[in-house]
Image (tube, rainbow, N blue to C red):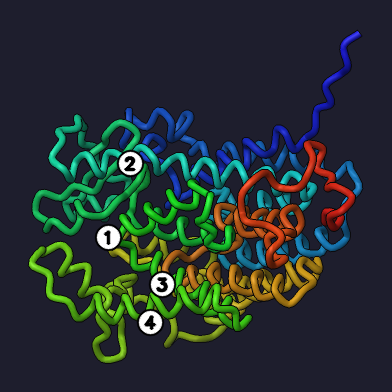
Amino acid sequence: MKPRIKFKMEDLMIPLFLLYCFYSYGLAPYFTWETFAGGTFNNCFGIPLRSIIAAIIVVIGLTNVVKGKLSKKSVHMCIWCMFTMAISIIQSGIDHIFSFEWLIYLVLCVFLLIEDSGKIKAYRYFYNIFVFSLIAPIIIYILVHIGVNVPYIIINAPEEIKTINSVSYKIYPLAAQWYNPYADAYRSLRLCGIYNECGVVGTYSALLLSIEGYRLKGNWKNIVLLIGGILSFSLAFYFLTICYFIVRAIDINWKYMVPLIIIVVIYIIFVNVHFANEALTKFQNRFLITDYVLNGDNRTSPGYDRIYENFIHEGGRKLLFGNGLNEIEDILVSKNIDGSSYKNLIFDYGIFGFFNQIIWIVVYFIYRKIGSTRKEKIYIAACCFVFIANMYQRPSMFALQFLLPLIGGIIYQLHYRPQIYKSGEYSGGGKPPFRENGNRKSSARKPLVR
């Protein structure tokens, strides 16, 4: 008699989590856009597939996960998340209830309630999918820039503001690239991967490399992330990388201080070199500091600033609790104004909501006692700092596409690969020290429970 295959709910939930992440705004590949193939993979009978996926996660997840034994600490963090959701709904009004935007909170709660083995699997799949999504674009990027004629089609941008600014996309086999016949060569110099912005490649490359500890020796996947981040020419990639090494340098370890020193030296040299290439010159100008402001800080526009300043001057309850879910995004779209900044979070969720998100992230790891040694705590602080710093240019409130790799990645690194943080005992290669059932070998620390 054949043994029965035991089905675990997380085996179903993980693919749904991944689909939800890669359908989320900013991370969605070109084939999920409404402008690609008539929106075949974008919506179903006018309902965004992301909302459908979220609803499936909530219904299946909450009806099955809650049946098991739940960690009180995970439940407490979920209650905190739900409290934030309630405030957002109250501030948004009845109009936003049927937009299903509030599902982002419930999806995150389901993720928090699954076992740590599920969080780790989700992270590993997320990591691998993103890495493999860069391989074909990097190859095509090289071929195009050495003069090889690679076939492509042109499609409209998924955002109206880009269409107004004459931005479209060249779609190569498994790759996308910004295209604007009126723009300079700088745009074509930047790697977009399969995403709508070069900054997506740079941001997620930096986030994942931070979680992986920037280990490059014997790890070709991290090398792919590094190459992708560099070729994206994303200011965020370099900024977040510096943030990571600044915090890790607190450990007074030359392993982290040397890269930081090298980055500073390269920066000084780079901003003082004269380039004949116009695209490289424009990239260089983004790193120059003028009047104590970085030239490359283009997250807002004059129209955006006026809307935000009026909001600040009004003060009152809205300044404290915000205007509600995605309110500023609706205003910007209606007025064809571009902008994405941490100010989005303050406008939508108020000062309370903005700091509530930051405190929630820090408290999650402290409350669950993830990380016991000084090195582990510094590592967690570095990853959290990178995540929080990223909110400056990619605002997100309890967004799974950012918290899944952060939470799942840190748990994986600290509780399923402990040798990495014991000097001299692990070189960075080989398989992680845990068995298929998620249990560690007896010589290692026991895995963290939910």
Marks 1 and 2 sit apart, C-alpha to C-alpha, by 30 Å
Report helix, strand or loop for mark 4. helix
Which quarter shows the N terminus? top right
Q: Nearer the viewer, residue 17 or 262?
A: 262
Q: Quadrant of residue 360?
A: bottom right
* Residue 5 as seen in the image, left or right of residue 387: right
Which quarter shows the C terminus? bottom right
The residue at 10%/64% (across/down) is: 278
Report helix, strand or loop for mark 3. helix
Label 4 crowd (10 A; few <14 / some 14-19 / many >=20): few
Circle 4: residue type: Asn
Residue 34 visible in the snapshot: no
Instruction: Name the residue beneath numbered marker 2.
Output: 137
Instruction: Name the residue beneath numbered marker 3.
Output: 239
Q: Nearer the viewer, residue 310 or 390?
A: 390
Instruction: Name the residue beneath numbered marker 4.
Output: 310
